[in-house]
Amino acid sequence: MDVSVITVTWNSVNFIATQLASVQAGCLGLAYEQIVVDNGSTDKTVDIVKNQFPQVKLLDFKENKGFGAANNIAAKQSSGRYFLLLNPDMKVIPGSIGKSVAWADANPRAGIIGVKLVKSTGEINLNTSPRRFPSLSDALALNLKISWLFPSMLQRYMARDLDLHKAQSVDSVQGSFMLVRRELFEKLGHLFDERYFIWYEDVDLCQEVKRLGYEVWYNPIIECIDYGSQSFKLRRPLWKQNIFIKSQVAYFEKWGPWYAKFILLFFKPVSLVIALVRTLFV
C-alpha cells in the first residue's frame, strides 16, 4: 500500500463528498486507502460517507476525540507507506497525491511534505503557507491581536520572506495537507501528540521530525485547493481562543522557554475578553 489518506471530520457535510471524490482522482496509479474518522458530527457527514463512498473505511465516533487523537486511531488501522493527512474542506488536484509520493520517494530525508495550498480562485492562500516555529512574542501578538495594529510583528513567524514558488526545507507546514512517512509514526509511536486537542499539533510534529534528523519540505509543484477551515467557522470565537491558548501552553511546555507557560496564562484573561468582544460582532 502506497498511501493511507486520513481525514478527520466534524460537521463537514458541505465539503466531504467533493474531497473524497477528488482523492480518488489524486491517487491515480497508486495503491491507496481512504479512512474517514468522524468526531461526533451532528449533520449528515457520516451518511454521505456511508452511502456515496462505501469503499472508504469509516470510523464513526459519537464524541469529539480531538484532531490528533482521531488521526492516531486511524493511523493504527492503516497500512500505507505514507500517511496523507487531509482536511475535509480540501479538493485534491488530479494526480497530485501520486506526485507527492513520487517526490517523497526521491527525497528520503524529507519526513514531512507540504504543498502549495490555493484558494478556489487559484491564488496562494497565505494563511496556510509554511511558517517558522513560533516564539513567545509571536504567541502573545496572536493572542492579544497586536498584529491587527502592527502587522509587521508577525512577518518572521508567517515567513513572508519565503519564495512560495520554490521547493525548500521549512520549519513547519500545515496539517491540512501533510504527507508523512510511516517510519516517523513507528519511531514516535503516534502521528500527533494527544496533549493538543486541536491547533499546534502539526507544529509539534514538525519539531519532532526535525529532532529525529529528518526535514520538513514545502513543494509548490503540487497544489491543493483549500476552502479554509469550514468546520472552525461553526465554532464561536471564545471557544476557539480558549482551545488555542491551551494548545500554545502545551507547545511551550514541551519546547520552551520554561517561563512561556506562565506569561501566556497571565495574559489569557485579556485574550479571552478580546475574543468575547469579538463574539458580539460575529
Image (cartoon, rainbow, N blue to C red):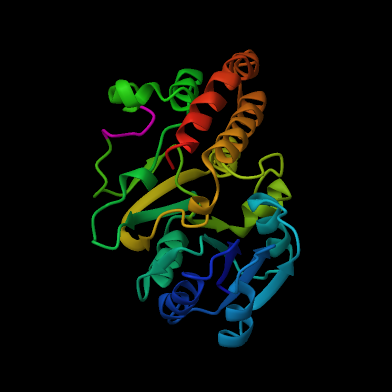
Majority secondary structure in the magenta region: loop
Q: Position of residue 50 (x, y in %)?
A: 64, 82
Image quadrant where residue 243 sits:
top right
Q: Is residue 247 left or right of residue 118?
A: right
Residue located at (66% from left, 28% from top) = 254
Q: How many marks overall?
A: 0
Residue located at (40% from left, 62% from top) = 103
Image quadrant where residue 75 sits:
bottom right
Q: Position of residue 273 (x, y in %)?
A: 54, 24
Residue 158 forms part of the magenta stretch: yes
Image quadrant where residue 29 sits:
bottom left
Comparing 45 with 206, the one in front is: 45
Comparing 166 with 128, the one in front is: 128
Residue 70 higher or lower than 211, as above or below: below
Residue 36 forms part of the magenta stretch: no
Q: Is residue 54 left or right of residue 146?
A: right
Image quadrant where one finds the C terminus: top left
Q: Position of residue 261 (x, y in %)?
A: 64, 19
Residue segment shown in magenta: 156-161
Residue 108 higher or lower than 24, as above or below: above
Q: Is residue 73 left or right of residue 26?
A: right
Image quadrant where one finds the N terminus: bottom right
Q: Is residue 28 left or right of residue 123?
A: right
Q: Position of residue 116 (x, y in %)?
A: 33, 55
Comparing 182 with 97, the one in front is: 97
Residue lying farthest front? 280
Residue located at (43% from left, 22% from top) = 141
Comparing 166 with 201, the one in front is: 201
